[in-house]
Amino acid sequence: MAKKIQEYITYLSPNYIYVPFDNMELLRIKKSKNVYHNMSLGTTSDGKYIYSPVSGRIVGLKEMEYNGGKFNSLVIENDFIDKKEVLKPLKNVSKLKKAEIIESLTKYGLNKNINSKTTLVVNSLYNKKYDLRDMVINHESYEEILEAIDEFMSVFNMKNCYICIDKNDLYSINAYEKYINAFLNICLVHSNRRFKDNKCVFYGVEDILAIHKAICLDYMYDNTIVTINYNGVPTIVKVKLYTSLYELLKALKIAYTNKVIYINNKQINNILDFVLDSSCRSIIIKDRK
């Protein structure tokens, strides 16, 4: 009998969310400062839309540290309701025009240069000690991922998709093998090294779920999964985007005083002001030497 996949912890109701922005003049904030889940808060200087992953109220501005550097952020106090401005029905992808789909992908920062000659490559990363995100996503959502890939390929008339899974990630491999034979143009490989052609386009497995949500529901994918390695033991946590690292560790009762913390193998100096986004895959906590 196969060993049961490691369960994860959910922390999807943080007290505060820190949404990064780079230009105050490009923000669109209501006078009441109230925000809804998935509400557009404006754009960045390069035109990317900014969305709120929770509903609540903007209570201030603060410079915070992210995996990509320091940015000003909107501090949103969570009302724990996730109220939405509009409840949107599930869209039938086959009835959407390509221009509508491209618009949805662009809104959520997921659009890439794709046409009928493009080969879709979906990367799945794995490290049994430090990075279990994609293993959990694959195990839970392999049906949704395969169906989303199939829909995505049909929109752009793409002919082939390769899902690259580490040969040691047996949970993911076993999950996909239950259903992948139903999709003739999608296959599993164990390396993406041969996909160097400029006709290839690359996404991660979490990106595929985000694409599905953007196209079918017009919503952002508002959570991510991180692996916390503490005392040599990995803990998998599903967390709301833009949650404070300090709040997460405190909620999980993980002692961090006199410890060294690494995000994606990069040391973090200011734990109190660090914010987790989708680029954060691993958190390693070690004793100071």
Image (tube, rainbow, N blue to C red):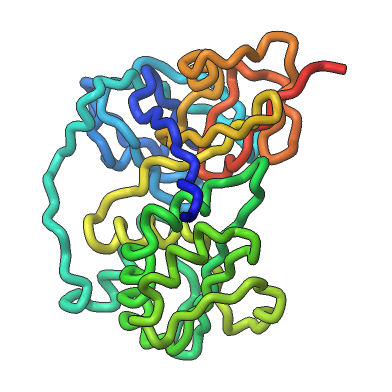
Q: Tell which of 79 and 225 is nearer to you.
A: 225
Q: Tell which of 159 and 35 is nearer to you.
A: 159
Q: Quadrant of residue 147?
A: bottom left
Residue 14, above or below 215: above
| 45 horizontally vs 100: left or right | right
Relative image position of residue 275 (x, y in whole percent): 54, 28
Please report the residue visible at 46 percent of the width from the left and 16 percent of the height from the top. Answer: 251
| 70 horizontally vs 4: left or right | right
- Outermost residue toward the top in this view: 257
Please report the residue visible at 17 percent of the width from the left and 37 percent of the height from the top. Answer: 84
| 122 horizontally vs 105: left or right | right
Q: Tell which of 268 and 137 is nearer to you.
A: 137
Relative image position of residue 62 (x, y in whole percent): 51, 19
Residue 275, above or below 154: above
Please report the residue visible at 44 percent of the width from the left and 52 percent of the height from the top. Answer: 137
Residue 198, above or below 134: below
